[in-house]
Image: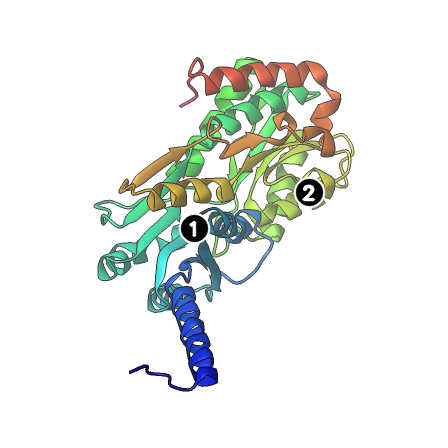
């Protein structure tokens, strides 16, 4: 005996059953979540902004649902958002910032079903579900040193960094090495560090440091102070002969005719690479990316360099030397570490 004896009822009954099957299938195919946890609320830090764009890229490529959670700038605030990401069922949790280092080991071990990805910082005895991504920032920093030395009018250059730690000091050393390779007689000011409570977001402190360098005769500054770079640009605005190399993203439009170039860090590219590896079954706990992978670059050597406002593009001999060194690094012919 048929379950539906009346023809209209039978017809609509099958329609209802089909709709239920469609809803069930749609629910089963709901994308897994990839959640980016910011260490602080929204600010001007270009690198942190790339976390959101990075998970969006990965989501499009691998059918994931991207979500960004903003933390209060405290240890408790960051822990709360990490816990929220796990509670929301994230398949992958992404973080940028040294602020998460002390939280990751216990959080990752307490959620073995979740994969965690942190950029720029690794921890000892890393749990198997944590992948750290390190950038070979020494490569573009070396090129920035060359560029600064080749572009300086008085052979006096310097670098202002965000926080004095082993990673940033290594970049400063690469900057110095590149400068000496381009001009053995160049005078390099001692690297100055913003440090303090907000080393990556302190334009006022960065401005003071830039004025110190300028007063000491430096005419090209490598600005590696994250959101503090705006303070460095402000200091240079009153010094028409001084130039600066920005960092993070293309900042050349922020101080017209004064920004030589930028050391770009493509966190979004690195995130997409890491997520792709995880989705395809990788269990690696460390990834190392640089010029070759497109995760770091100089704006002036990029495919869209002509659309930037970087001053180095007016210095063809400098660009040619940078291209030669860039190619040598990518081919493994020039080791900058």
Q: Is residue 302 left or right of residue 79?
A: right
> How far apart are the two marked residues, 1 and 2, measured between alpha carbons?
24 Å
- Element at label 1: loop
Q: Nearer the viewer, residue 215 or 330?
A: 330
Q: Is residue 72 left or right of residue 251?
A: left
- Element at label 2: helix
Q: Residues within 10 Å of mark 2 (few under 14, many from 20)?
A: many
- In the rendered image, which residue does mark 2 sit on? 233
User: In the picture, which quadrant includes the C terminus?
Assistant: top left
Picture residue at 28% right of the left edge, 40% below the top: 284
Q: Sequence order check: which comes first, mark 1 or mark 2?
A: 1
Q: Is residue 38 visible?
A: no
Numbered disc total: 2
Q: Nearer the viewer, residue 31 or 268?
A: 31
Q: Nearer the viewer, residue 77 or 126?
A: 126
Q: Residues within 10 Å of mark 1 (few under 14, many from 20)?
A: some
């Amino acid at each position: 005996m048929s379950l539906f004896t009346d023809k209209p009822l039978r017809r609509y009954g099958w329609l209802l059953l089909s709709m239920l099957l469609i809803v069930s299938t749609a629910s089963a195919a709901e994308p897994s979540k990839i959640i980016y946890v910011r260490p602080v609320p929204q600010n001007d830090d270009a690198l942190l902004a790339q976390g959101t764009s990075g998970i969006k890229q990965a989501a499009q490529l691998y059918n994931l649902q991207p979500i960004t959670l903003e933390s209060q700038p405290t240890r408790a605030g960051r822990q709360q958002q990490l816990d929220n990401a796990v509670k929301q069922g994230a398949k992958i949790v992404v973080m940028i910032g040294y602020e998460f280092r002390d939280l990751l080991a216990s959080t990752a071990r307490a959620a073995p079903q979740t994969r965690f990805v942190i950029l720029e910082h690794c921890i000892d005895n890393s749990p198997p579900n944590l992948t750290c991504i390190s950038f070979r920032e020494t490569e573009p920093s070396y090129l920035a040193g060359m560029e600064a030395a080749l572009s300086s009018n008085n052979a006096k250059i310097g670098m202002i960094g965000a926080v004095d730690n082993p990673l940033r000091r290594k970049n400063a050393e690469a900057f110095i090495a590149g400068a000496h390779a381009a001009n053995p007689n160049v005078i390099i000011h001692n690297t100055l560090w913003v440090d303090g409570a907000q080393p990556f977001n302190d334009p006022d402190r960065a401005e003071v440091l830039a004025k110190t360098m300028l007063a000491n005769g430096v005419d090209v500054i490598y600005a590696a102070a994250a959101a503090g770079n705006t303070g460095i640009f402000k200091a240079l605005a009153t010094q028409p002969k001084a130039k600066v190399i920005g960092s993070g993203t293309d900042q050349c439009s922020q101080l017209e005719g004064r920004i030589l170039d930028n050391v770009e860090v493509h966190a979004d590219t690195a995130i997409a690479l890491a997520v792709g590896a995880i989705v395809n079954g990788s269990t690696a706990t460390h990834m190392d990316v640089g010029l070759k992978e497109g995760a770091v670059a100089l704006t002036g050597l990029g495919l869209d360099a002509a659309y930037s406002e970087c001053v180095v593009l007016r210095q063809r001999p400098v660009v040619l030397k940078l291209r030669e060194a860039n190619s040598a690094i990518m081919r493994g012919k020039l080791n900058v570490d």
